[in-house]
Image (cartoon, rainbow, N blue to C red):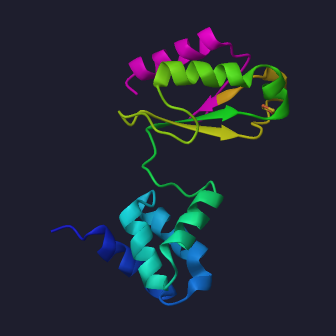
Amino acid sequence: MNPTIEDQVAELTRPYAGAPSELIQALHRVQGQLGHIPREAQAAVAKALGVPLSQVRGVITFYHFFRTAPVGRHTLRLCLGTACHVRGADLILKAIREELGVGLGETTADGAFTVEGVRCLGACGLAPVMMVGEEVYGRLDPKRTKRILRQIREGGG
Ligand code: FES
């Protein structure tokens, strides 16, 4: 029988048991192993370290690198930095929403895409820009964005 999430978390947080100041370390370890921190894991971390569940949730919400849901096969990073903002990043986000049915911080129901917003992808000259996986797509417009996403999906994503 596979170990439950509670068992796994108890094992992973053993070095931090009863040490509330190690909360972030413990969460990193749990996410490193499980890929994300679902509700059951949050409760198990709270119990192991002796901190209120609300504190665990607060930390996860505050630090964007903690995830409460699994990541999609493709991570789409949309740049929301100044150059991209000025050149219509919000229209690109709208196109992404229309094409994928999800917004920032969300994963499509089929697990194909996780959408994230980032501050700058270092390609401001190509604004507006997004990355899908390691691939950079610049000079986007809503139509092209949708076409790219469709192609990635049809390509077996
Ligand atoms: S602001 Fe978008 S790439 Fe720099």
- At 30% from the left edge and 76% from the top edge, which residue is drawn? 7
- At 31% from the left edge and 68% from the top edge, which residue is drawn? 5
Query: Within the magenta stretch, is there residue 147?
Result: yes
**Residue extending furthest left?**
1
Q: Position of residue 89 (x, y in %)?
A: 72, 24
Magenta span covers which residues?
Answer: 131-157
- At 50% from the left edge and 90% from the top edge, which residue is drawn? 18
Quarter occupied by residue 40: bottom left
Q: Position of residue 88 (x, y in %)?
A: 76, 20
Against 147, residue 12 (above or below) is: below
- At 41% from the left edge and 59% from the top edge, which residue is drawn? 38
Q: Quadrant of ligand 1?
A: top right
Horizontal placement of 77 versus 71: left or right? right
**Residue extending furthest top?**
143
Query: Within the magenta stretch, is there residue 48?
Result: no
Q: Position of residue 14 (x, y in %)?
A: 43, 85
Against 98, residue 45 (above or below) is: below
